[in-house]
Amino acid sequence: MRTRFNLGDLIDRDNGRLDEPAIIDLAGAEPRTVSFRALDNMAAAAARGLLASGLVRGDRVAILSANRSEYLAAYLGAMQAGLVAVPINYRFPREMTDVVLRDAGAKIVFCDVERLPACPERLPAVVFGGAQTSAGPRSFEAFCRPGSFEPVRPADGETAMILYTSGSTGRPKGVVLSHASHLWVVKTRMAAQDLAPHRLLVAAPLYHMNALALAKLSIASGATMVLLPQFTAATYMEAIARYRCTWLTAVPPMIAMVLREKALVAGTDFSSVAFLRMGSAPVSPALLEAIHRTMPAATVVNAYGTTECGPVVFGPHPGGLAQPPLSVGYPHPLVSLRLVDGSDRQATQGVLEMNSPARMTGYHDRPDIPPPFAADGFYITGDVFRRDGDGFHYFVGRTDDMFVCGGENIYPGEVEKLLERHAAVAQACVVPVDDEVKGKKPVAFCVRREGVAVSEDELKRFALAHAPAYMHPRAVWFLDRLPLTTTNKVDRKALLDRAAASTLSSGREP
């Protein structure tokens, strides 16, 4: 791999693949195939256009759009020009979008036509897929300046991008990431697997680390990326079958939504899928079982990563031991990890702290938030893990989600795993409700497996039989599906509110 210095300069111009398809873009009425050469030219033209518009090194360039090839061209071009790319969650309410744009100090916004109304009038907007008019904002094609461009060579630690957290529990935080940090991610992941022969499906939103990191990896590897504008179960399955996708990545609830569509699953050819990487949320035994039935040729990897420290955290066991199905793997040799329980930094269960070249610089302009770093620079994830005797790690839960029931610490993820062991439960989400005696008590929302009946009392008895009594859910509600956040994770806050309202309105013992 050639030496790269700028995160926007990922395309290998010497590998003989410039005229091969880099992106199969499904954002329009008809699919568009974009070669590596065309993508390279688009990124260079975007960089030239940004500098011609008066932006200077370090200025912030916001991107507010569903997935499309121009999104990636603008993202790469901004960084090539020495500017800071700021992908924004296009599902934010308009007020939140404005908060993030102000927080980032954005000087310009690239957007698609659908998101143009959310762009504040104070900022110039450049529109993907829109016709150029004399009165309206500039189209992407009119904004770009075709021609060659030499990418800026960043200084040590220079910022490449700012990724914003979802903001589900408050004002979003901007995670500041350098060119060097994510070039290291790309290089490290390329060394682990040759992706050039693969056809990767990207359906998660590009404002999220899960999809954005994979898109960069695909471009740098010379692989072909099938890019969906946004995820739906139907379009996801159609893309797999039509384009013979071999490499998938997703948040587990996305795959759960796919497998729930029984008729579509039955009519879809999944035989091309060789690899499925899931991350950003816990994986249940029921989901893994269903995946293996549906995609028997696929290697399934349960992965873990954070926006703040990147997707390279765990990997295969150095002794060749098989990774247990619910484990996220063995610590990557280039990443320093530890589990911390109070003053014990060698605990077998505790909060994961880590350090790697992918670590963020910090949160952008948030003096109100204590930096999440230990004294020696380790990033404190807030995620609790357990390590087994072979060194494999297992996600237990978030410290933010943990609650105390009668003096006992309960991690909702542990109760969820317990419930998902029942043959009738496809998915579970556990949240606390207030209790005058215990302080908090667990209640559960469950999705039944199709065609399998189970009652609330049966699940309570199952929990009591297989775990300490304090962990059993005091109430169980059944849903057809669990609500999701804008990043396709289970919306725990929505269920917490629903549980509180249900217990208050019914007067039911939680």
Image: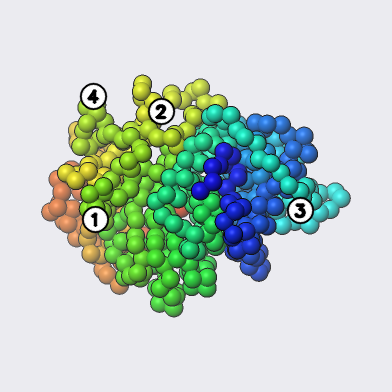
Q: Depth-wise, is mark 1 or mark 4 nearer the camera?
A: 1
> Mark 1 or mark 3: which comes first in sequence?
3
> Which residue is painted at 47% across and 33% down in the image?
360
Q: What is the CA distance from the residue labelled 1 to the residue labelled 4?
A: 32 Å
Where disc 1 sits, the SS reads loop
Label pair 2/3, CB-CB below 8 angstroms: no
Tell me the number on the disc at residue 343: 4
Neighbour tally class for label 1: few under 14, some 14-19, many 20 plus, Cα within 10 Å: few
131 relative position to 170: left or right = right
Where is residue 241 drawn, in percent x and y?
Answer: 48, 73
Label pair 4/2, CB-CB below 8 angstroms: no
Where disc 4 sits, the SS reads loop
487 relative position to 32: left or right = left
Where is residue 28 drawn, in percent x and y?
Answer: 66, 64
Where disc 3 sits, the SS reads helix
Where is residue 353 drawn, in percent x and y?
Answer: 33, 33
Q: Give the residue number, with chain letter if any, for mark 3.
A: 141
Specify the amino acid type for callout 2.
Pro
Label pair 1/3, CB-CB below 8 angstroms: no
Q: What is the CA distance from the residue labelled 2 to the residue labelled 3?
A: 42 Å
Specify the amino acid type for callout 1.
Ala
> Mark 4 or mark 2: which comes first in sequence?
4
Q: Depth-wise, is mark 2 or mark 1 nearer the camera?
A: 1
Q: Give the residue number, with chain letter if any, for mark 2.
A: 372
Residue 307 visible here? no
Q: Depth-wise, is mark 2 or mark 3 nearer the camera?
A: 3
Residue at the limit of the structure toward the bottom, as seen here: 267
Q: Give the residue number, with chain letter if any, for mark 1.
A: 322
> Mark 1 or mark 4: which comes first in sequence?
1
Neighbour tally class for label 4: few under 14, some 14-19, many 20 plus, Cα within 10 Å: few
